[in-house]
Image: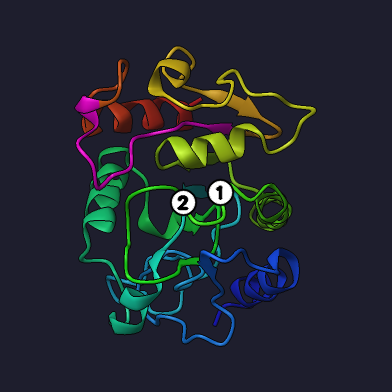
Amino acid sequence: MNADIAKLRQDMFDAIGPYPRDCVSFDGRRTMTGTAFFPAGDGLWKGDGNTDPTLPVGGILFLGSNWGDNDSYDECGEGEANGRTWRGLLKLVGLAGIARNEIFCTNAWPCLRAGGRAVGGVVPGSRDPEFTSRCKVFFLRTLELMRPKLVVPLGKLPTSFIASLTPTEPSPWGKASSWREIDPTPVWRCRDFNVVPIVHPSMPNHRYRQFAKTIEAEAALVRSVLAR
């Protein structure tokens, strides 16, 4: 395992416990050896023969909500590159002209959902302010280690998470509870990186956005920000 990823994983275990009732820790669980969002895997692209990638310092960070449910994790294989999320994400990455070895994919609430319901309803832990605060402390450590030039939240919940990351730097999106709040300001300069929210790549974004209503439009936005 890459030393930076190993450090992140240990920092996570040290930082975010104890876990709320609806959350399950990754501590003591196997780590996927293939392509998978952190902390289920290393958060790095491991296709095209690239079996031992390194954390892309200065690259692009994609931020999801949480990995999914506990039961599915126990039943899954060694990677998730063929799933809907990664298929959509890789399409956007290609359209935006981003090299796959430049991306790191992680989650705002790095835990599993208790039980067998992978999606739907509230993200586990997101309504627990103390747990969310600990997750933000860990995410700040991730930012310090990776120093990304761009952070791309995948959907409203991770956008809300990063919008309230540091009280001294309020975002233009308020609580980011709807695309009506987010779309008027599609790019936010936070700290020393840009933030460009997109609809979760597993979903048809034309149903939600007022601004970039296709994955092609979102990719064009990302590409234009990277060209600045």
| Residue 143, percent from left and from top | 67, 50
- Residue closest to the eye, 176 or 63: 176
**What secondary structure is found at the residue carrying circle 1?**
loop
* 128 relative to 95 in the view: left or right: right
Residue range of the region highlighted in magenta in the rendering: 194-207
- In the displayed structure, 162 sits above or below 25; it is above
Tell me the residue at 28%/54% (across/down): 85
Q: Are marks 1 and 2 in contact (CB under 8 Å)?
A: yes
Q: At 54% from the left edge and 59% from the top edge, which residue is drawn?
A: 56
Whether 199 is among the magenta residues is yes
Residue 67: quarter of image: bottom left
Say whether residue 163 is left or right of residue 79.
right
Q: Which residue is mark 1?
A: 126
- The type of residue carrying mark 1 is Ser
Could you classify mark 2 by the number of other residues whose Cα lies within 10 Å: few (under 14), some (14-19), or many (20 or more)? many
Of residues 76 and 131, the one nearer the viewer is 131
Q: Amino acid at mark 2?
A: Val
Looking at this rendering, what residue extends furthest in the right direction?
168
Magenta-span inclusion, residue 53: no
**Residue 185: image x %, image y %?**
49, 16
For label 2, the residue is 123
